[in-house]
Amino acid sequence: MSRGILAPVGVVLSAAMSLATAQAEQFKCPRTGGNFVFGQEANINTLDQMTSSTISTRNIAMNIYESLMTRDENNHPILELAQAMNEAPDHLTYTFKLRQGVHFQNGKPLTSADVVASFDRYAKVGNQRSTLDNVDRWDAPDPATFVIHMKRIQPTFIEALSSFSVPIVIIPAENRDVPAQQLTQPIGTGPYQLVEAIPGSAVKLKRFDGYQPNTSFQERTGFGGYKQACFDTVTFRIVTEPGARVAGLRTGELPGVEDVPSKSVADLKQDAGITILPLKNWWIQIASPNVSNPPTDKLLVRKAIQAALDMDEIMDAASDGNYQLNVGFQYPNQPDYTDAGKETYNIHDPELAKKYLAQAGYQGEPVVLLTNKDYPPMYNSALVMQQQLQAVGINAQMKVVDWPTSVQMSQNTTEGWNFFYTGWGTQPALGALATMQFLVQPNASYKPVGGKDDPDILAAWNDMNTLPTPEGRQNAFALMQKLVLERVYAVPFGAFTKVQAVRSNVDGFVPFRIPRMSNVWFSH
Amino acid sequence: MGGILVRRLLGAIPILLLVSLITFGMIHMIPGDPAVAIAGMSATPEQIANIRRDLGLDQPLLRQLWDWYANLFRGDLGRSLLLGQPVVQATMLRLPVTLALSAYALLLTLLIGLVTGIVAALRQNTWIDQAAMVLAMIGISLPSFYLGLLMIIVFAVGLRLLPTGGYIALTEDPLGWLATSTMPAVSLALLLAGLLARITRSTMLEVLRQDYIRTARAKGLPGRTVVVKHALANALIPITTVVGIIVSLLISGSVVIETLFSIPGIGQLLTQAVLNRDYPMVQGGLLITTALLVLVNIGVDLCYAWLDPRVHYDGA
């Protein structure tokens, strides 16, 4: 475990231990300079990180901003702008000592007043402001200290605080009152700073010369660690057309790209000048049933549907062959992973499906699959599922709309659809807690009858949040996953692999949840 | 001429008001809202609800319509929900990009279309005529998106002559602008040049059969004078009408091409605004674009009067 990685909560955490040895081995850019142009697949709408949960915003903004805490390479919480964190014995106070010498990209030194202002703004406009629901108040007793006072004990608070879904990034105090979506000139403490942002075209960053790396680490890890900007500038060019991204990679105009189409991978592998970097477990492809609308209100019908599915066929079509079969809501490389409920996964038994249908008294009522073409994996998985359901005698019908419409329908009405297709990407990467929130109110994706949670599911969820030991919380997660799969409140198909690629003269680029531009350099 | 211009401009006001009302109605009739786009794919319903509340999307529709018109009459087109920028600022940043690209494409369209059409008409029923019309048909038939992809493969990946995408402003680096705009402009122009060539050919053929052309030839005027001064000058009136339509098609066609070549123009801006239900951006952006197209059409009308003294707009 690297120094600085968070120890179990309830202890004093200091990141300054063994500093002398760390400094001797810290990362140094082998070469500096150059403009790294990265071909990004999706447009960005904003760089106001507090008010956006989109991957495209995070791709860029997380190179500009930093937080008190973040996650390491293995998704463990670590300190970032904090030098040390002390959790009081009563678990109701968290005291953070800030790292010294940190400056914002406007030259102003970081103080606890900026942290207070950042939390103030997040509480007002942050997309995931519920993170602070159990927080009573925060204050800054001195310029280097920030204290969070809780209303009640929340064993999972540090996990939530270090989340990178919509991180509580630290901004200068003068930006406290900027309304949501309107922070168009982002200023953070990260290794790169904004030069210009042209929505729909490109975002250019340059090295922040006043960057103060976190000397508690030797290397970059996850979103934190010891970071260095080796490039002079980094340009994120928005290239939504996959063929154009591949063309740019081939010519070298785009030394790095994300989301390489599967059909191009074999060809690109033949090119010695290109390195293919698969990022496994990118997202979980999933269909959420609507248990408030017949015929999927009947458990036996849902079990029949579950029994009919061949996940290999579905994932192959959805991902163009880039997938792994995966039980449940975490990935095998994650500490929270469990295969609880695996007997319900990938059954592919048409006879069993027919038996359940007969027991349910199914009379050919339509099962409407609500999907969209904006995300082809969602459309393709629905299409294959429709064929498989029809093969066992289910009257499966597709309802194809665009993505915003399908989301609105799935959230605002329980009529007119039976399965909604989506993908869970960031939340599974954050851990079980972030993922399973989709299965309880107010977010319950399976549309529980009358808006009331299944009591067994709710009890398991409460245990996941409140049991004092990690083992207890993990067991509660395993139980919740098992119940969700047995009662068919979600149908996870499998895990996607996202393929990134760089030119072979790009060193240090390791695929992660965002393309990290620190500790990456041109070798020649 | 000044009176005509003023009358036409005043006449445009109800058109713009009607367009803004239709746009407002249509964009709000589509299900889905910008909160979904802002929140991203993995967002929880709670996150989406927070955004909806922050942006005032939970207000009644009539209230939103009232606010839109009240702000419009104050000259305020609102603020893009996704970009966080004022709509006017966001539009004006991108409009010059699309206009420069469209002007380049229009120039290519006129050069290729007019020359091909005139040569085909003058060489009617020869192999030159046949070849020109086959080429025009290919131009019309090839989707600009497909043509753009082919050009990327040939000129960027294969020959390494031009960049695969991106954009450099004309004011920043004219040669860089030329390099980044040539493939997009050609992709746009070939389709419309084919259309213009066919119309120019048929118009020229009709004019060349007129008595005054025969008279001009009988008087012994040189062939070039007959074609340029007498035939082409008269053929220009219907061609000017087509050019007005072509300008509209260039702006609407830029939607696809700007996306393919990563060009930050108005087409891409409005496409994203519609897909993400960015209501103020769609309403304001379309209003500005409509105003621009109305101005182009007024310009075309004024060109008629300039080209043909017999044309009057006094209502007589």
Image: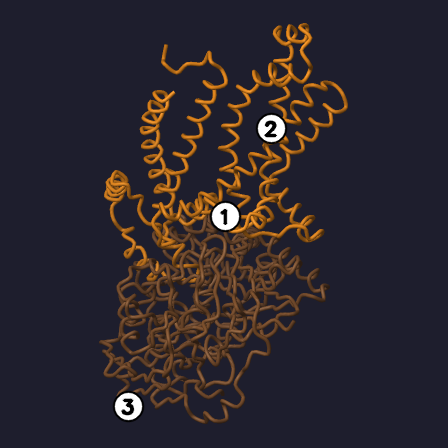
Chain colours: A brown, B orange
User: Which residue carries the number 2 mark?
Assistant: B195
Whole-angstrom CA distance, mark 2 to mark 3, is 79 Å
Secondary structure at numbered mark 1: loop
- Please check whether the numbered discs 1 and 3 fall on a single chain: no
Q: In percent of the image, x 53 and y 25: which residue is there?
A: B242
Q: Which mark is residue B171?
A: 1
Q: Report the chain holding disc 1.
A: B
Residue A212: where, in percent of width, then height?
A: 43, 79
Secondary structure at numbered mark 2: helix
Secondary structure at numbered mark 3: loop
Q: Quadrant of residue B147?
A: top right
Residue A406: where, in percent of width, then height?
A: 42, 51
Q: Which mark is residue A89?
A: 3
**Within 10 Å of the Cα at label 3, are there few (<14), some (14-19), or many (20+) other Cα atoms?**
few
Whole-angstrom CA distance, mark 1 to mark 2, is 31 Å
Q: Nearer the viewer, mark 1 or mark 2?
A: 1
Q: In this picture, is B240 found above or below A389?
A: above
Residue A134: where, in percent of width, then height?
A: 26, 75
Q: Which amino acid, by three-letter code, is at mark 3? A: Pro
Whole-angstrom CA distance, mark 1 to mark 3, is 63 Å
Q: Nearer the viewer, mark 2 or mark 3?
A: 2
Q: Is residue A266 left or right of residue A357?
A: right
**Within 10 Å of the Cα at label 1, are there few (<14), some (14-19), or many (20+) other Cα atoms?**
few
Q: Quadrant of residue B190?
A: top right
Q: Nearer the viewer, residue A365 or A184?
A: A184
Q: Nearer the viewer, residue B253 or A207?
A: A207
Q: Which amino acid, by three-letter code, is at mark 2? A: Leu
Q: Which mark is residue A306?
A: none
Residue B105: where, in percent of width, then height?
A: 56, 37
Q: Nearer the viewer, residue B44 or B297?
A: B297
Q: Which amino acid, by three-letter code, is at mark 1? A: Thr
